[in-house]
Amino acid sequence: MKIVVIGGSGLIGRNVVRRLVAQGHDPVAASPSTGVDTITGEGLGDVTVGADVVVDVSNAPVWDDDAVMEFFTTSSRNLLAAERDAGVGHHVAVSIVGADRLPDSGYLRAKVAQEAEIEAGEIPFTVLRATQFFEFLTQIVEAGADGDSVRLSTGLIQFVAADDVAATVAELAIGAPAGGHVELGGPEALGIDAWARRLFAATGDERAVIADPHARYYGTELHGGELTPGAGARIGAVDFGTWFAANQQEAR
Ligand SMILES: NC(=O)c1ccc[n+]([C@@H]2O[C@H](COP(=O)([O-])OP(=O)(O)OC[C@H]3O[C@@H](n4cnc5c(N)ncnc54)[C@H](OP(=O)(O)O)[C@@H]3O)[C@@H](O)[C@H]2O)c1
């Protein structure tokens, strides 16, 4: 199958491409660095010719509220129009568990808008709603950095490894369109403050972790389990210890 992977140079995209090659498919990594731009439309017509499936794992280069909304709506519209012209039979995208429960976050509002474009379009689709990737744990913790301490929300996150996300995307891409969303989370849900303590214990970071129920996560307060998946979600195999050990190996 010819499978175009928009965002094929990114964290999830390159992993998906590698998996599809190993499975004998014909993935095409597409992004600005390969001459395909979903905002300007450059290269979109050519790359979608003969494609069976388009996987969209692109991400906005700038995350302020207006820019990220503009990115996900414009890129989805342009991409879906090119897919319609090319007769693509399946659009797969990665969104975020609970995005629709946290309208105070500009990034999450943009992901909801992306999902709405896909649902309103004519291409049969599957949306994978994943929880936060372990690969973003450090970034999420550092967002609360304040001198010798970090101040973080007690809201729950169920981190999942990018490797588990990519495996699920690759599996969904070669299957039939779900016509809706599929949820994926990691093996364990903890407060963001508790994740920071676990990370600091593993890295030897001696900063204090202050649990603050009002600390914001990407512009929004969390009140409990808004970011955790519901019953029936797929659960990734990689837990924190396994992910951290593998990550340390790669860093050497
Ligand atoms: N981070 C999380 O915890 C999380 C959780 C759930 C879902 N997600 C979603 O997962 C998806 C993938 O995230 P990621 O971390 O793998 O992304 P990433 O590593 O930041 O990669 C972004 C990709 O988007 C491409 N891109 C940027 N602008 C583009 C454009 N105008 N046209 C085409 N491609 C463009 C980049 O291409 P170049 O390299 O060529 O610039 C790159 O390949 C995102 O949609 C994100 O919202 C993330």
Image: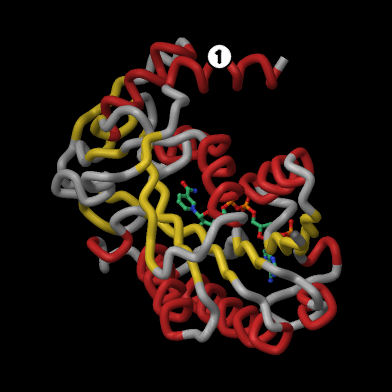
Left or right of residue 45, residue 228 in this image: left
Q: Hey, which quadrant is residue 233 in on the image?
A: top left
Which of 19 and 15 lies nearest the eye of the viewer?
Answer: 19
Label 1 crowd bin: few (<14), some (14–19), many (20+), radius 10 Å: few
Residue extending furthest toward the front: 176
Coordinates of residue 5 in the picture (x, y in percent): 70, 60
Coordinates of residue 163 in the picture (x, y in percent): 57, 35
Q: At x 80% / y 59%, what residue is drawn?
A: 28
Judge whether 105 appears above or below 78 on screen: above
Left or right of residue 23, residue 233 in this image: left
Left or right of residue 134, residue 235 in this image: left
Q: At x 20% / y 36%, what residue is drawn?
A: 154
- Kind of residue at disc 1: Ala
Q: Hey, which quadrant is residue 113 in on the image?
A: bottom left
* Image quarter where ligand 1 lies: bottom right
Judge whether 204 appears above or below 149 on screen: above
Q: Quadrant of the C terminus?
A: top right
Q: Quadrant of the N terminus?
A: bottom right
Coordinates of residue 62 in the picture (x, y in percent): 57, 64
Q: At x 72% / y 55%, what residue is drawn?
A: 8
Q: At x 28% / y 48%, what residue is drawn?
A: 227
Which of 59 and 180 lies nearest the eye of the viewer?
Answer: 180
Coordinates of residue 218 in the picture (x, y in percent): 36, 54
Question: Which residue is identified by label 1?
Answer: 245
